[in-house]
Image (tube, rainbow, N blue to C red):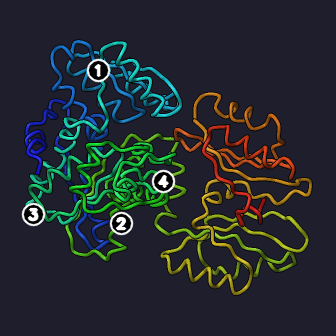
């Protein structure tokens, strides 16, 4: 075991500003999953996130000369608040570079701690580049969010607390992974003093930089990352954190957006707290792991890493949580357009609770219905699917992201006036005038035949766009969307969209 880290964690300076957070029993999850589930409440920190630990430990160890010049970081969220509060407590100047996509509530929170906020670029990478340029000009010390030994040691105090708080060894600890600072500190310390405890990291399936790096045996730079769990949306993990994770972490499990939303609801049901998506990752991963490996009668801790949730995002979380728990089934059903067919279809569903029902006449021969049904288990969903398939064509929409994000809001039937339509999903930076900028780019040459945008309270907006592209123009259009610089998915062959749109 690296002696440096054990000593650095033991002597970390965090409690000038951070608190020792409780390790609480989650009775409902425990009963449901047949394990003793404990929640480490880092969402109760003064900045509602564990990030204050590493930020303060790093800044407190600066030399007097470094402190005189002040500190600087690039962050759109929790690390920014940790650095800002730490600098305020120590009486230092702090500059925080944040992307222009950062919600105003987070900008105001950082400014409230007395830090200077500089808005630059549309992503963390843009902000980080500008922050490094400012460091060279000003002589300020850059406080890295994860790839720094003192930051890692500060985060490792979470593990030291858990060992003090339990009279027995933990069997498993689930930890969210972004850049890897938290899990690196926790795993290094726990493996020294509780070597039989399994350390399991959790990442979103669309932001799996550490998982992919471990699989490849070297650092992997993701081309793009998912935007929902923005607190862990990292394209490339740290060199030091990667090395420690390779050595001390037993496994990494991936979860999707629906599972994260379900975990947010689980935590709310336990203690009425609302954690952010990254803060619920550990519980989401624990639930998946317990199901996959039939884990029972184990003492399991999950790190609730943060609670800086954008209020606007709650509606999206509520929508998707039932699907993450497999308690809502979504189907696209085709029935004959004749008297009585609608009633016969409804009778097939019996007395089940309907969560959503969308229908519009599109032809005189067939009718298409978008239906959501409340279910109690995955098996019940499959039974309903089997019943419906006995009587009419059905498409299961459980894994259809375009249907869950867009189609359920815009069922309207086909237009006989549209020809040669291409459908694409785009993501663009959610900042003032961003939607207008996107439309200016996309609508200059090609006719838009469909457009659905919905604000999810995230740093990036998501749209479904239909564009009329003639056959001879397809190559030029493909070249055009590549120059836009926005992440995109071609949904032209999506069967559900073909039926309803």
Q: CA distance from mark 1 to mark 4?
A: 32 Å
Q: In the rendered structure, find residue 206 and report the number of the disc placed on it.
A: 4
Q: Residue at x 42, y 24 (%)?
A: 97
Q: In the rendered structure, find residue 71 and report the number of the disc placed on it.
A: 1
Residues marked 1 and 4 touching at CB (< 8 Å): no
Q: Which residue is mark 2?
A: 287
Helix, strand or loop status at disc 4: loop
Q: Which residue is mark 3?
A: 168
Residue 172 relative to residue 237: left or right: left
Residue 59 relative to residue 445: left or right: left
The tag earlier along the polypeptide, 1 or 4, is 1
Local crowd at mark 2 within 10 Å, few (<14), some, or many (≥20)?
some
Residue situated in front as seen by the camera: 291 or 483: 483
Quarter of the image where one finds residue 129: top left
Q: CA distance from mark 2 to mark 4?
A: 18 Å
Q: CA distance from mark 2 to mark 3?
A: 22 Å
The tag earlier along the polypeptide, 2 or 3, is 3
Q: CA distance from mark 2 to mark 1?
A: 39 Å
């Amino acid at each position: 075991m690296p002696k440096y880290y054990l000593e650095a964690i033991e002597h970390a300076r965090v409690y000038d500003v951070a608190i020792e957070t409780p390790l609480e029993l989650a009775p409902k999850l425990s009963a449901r999953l047949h394990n003793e589930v404990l929640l480490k409440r880092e969402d109760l920190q003064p900045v509602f996130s564990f990030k204050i630990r590493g930020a303060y430990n790093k800044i407190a160890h600066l030399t007097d000369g470094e402190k005189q010049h002040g500190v600087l970081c690039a962050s759109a969220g929790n690390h920014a608040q940790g650095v800002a509060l730490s600098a305020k407590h120590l009486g230092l100047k702090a500059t925080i570079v944040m992307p222009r996509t950062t919600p105003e509530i987070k900008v105001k929170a950082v400014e409230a701690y007395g830090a200077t906020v500089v808005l630059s670029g549309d992503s963390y990478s843009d902000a980080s580049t500008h922050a490094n340029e400012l460091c060279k000009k000003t002589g300020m010390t850059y406080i890295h969010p994860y790839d720094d030994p003192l930051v890692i040691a500060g985060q490792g105090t979470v593990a030291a607390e858990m060992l003090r708080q339990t009279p027995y060894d933990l069997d498993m600890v689930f930890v969210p992974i972004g850049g890897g600072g938290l899990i690196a500190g926790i795993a290094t310390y726990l493996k020294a003093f509780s070597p039989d405890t399994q350390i399991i990291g959790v990442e979103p399936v669309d932001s799996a930089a550490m998982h992919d790096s471990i699989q490849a045996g070297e650092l992997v730079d993701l081309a793009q990352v998912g935007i929902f769990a923005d607190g862990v949306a990292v394209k490339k993990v740290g060199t030091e954190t990667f090395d420690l994770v390779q050595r001390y972490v037993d496994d990494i499990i991936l979860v999707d957006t629906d599972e994260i939303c379900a975990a947010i609801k689980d935590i709310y049901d336990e203690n009425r707290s609302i954690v952010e998506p990254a803060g619920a990752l550990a519980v989401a991963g624990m639930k998946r792991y317990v199901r996959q490996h039939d884990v029972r009668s184990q003492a399991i801790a999950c790190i609730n890493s943060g609670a800086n949730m954008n209020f606007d995002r709650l509606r999206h979380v509520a929508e998707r949580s039932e699907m993450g728990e497999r308690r809502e089934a979504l189907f696209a059903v085709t029935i004959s357009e004749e008297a009585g067919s609608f009633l016969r279809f409804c009778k097939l569903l019996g007395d089940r609770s309907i969560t959503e029902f969308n229908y519009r006449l599109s032809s005189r021969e067939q009718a298409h219905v978008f239906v959501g049904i409340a279910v109690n288990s995955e098996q019940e969903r499959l039974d309903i699917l089997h019943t419906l398939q006995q009587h009419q064509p059905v498409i299961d929409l459980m894994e259809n992201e375009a249907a869950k994000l867009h189609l359920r809001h815009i069922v309207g039937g086909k237009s006989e006036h549209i020809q040669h339509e291409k459908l694409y999903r785009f993501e663009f930076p959610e900042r003032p005038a961003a939607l207008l900028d996107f439309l200016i780019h996309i609508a200059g040459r090609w006719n838009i035949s469909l457009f659905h945008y919905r604000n999810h309270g995230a740093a990036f907006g998501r749209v479904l766009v239909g564009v009329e592209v003639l056959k001879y123009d397809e190559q030029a259009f493909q070249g055009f969307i590549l120059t836009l610089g926005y992440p995109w998915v071609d949904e032209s062959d999506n069967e559900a969209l073909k039926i309803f749109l």
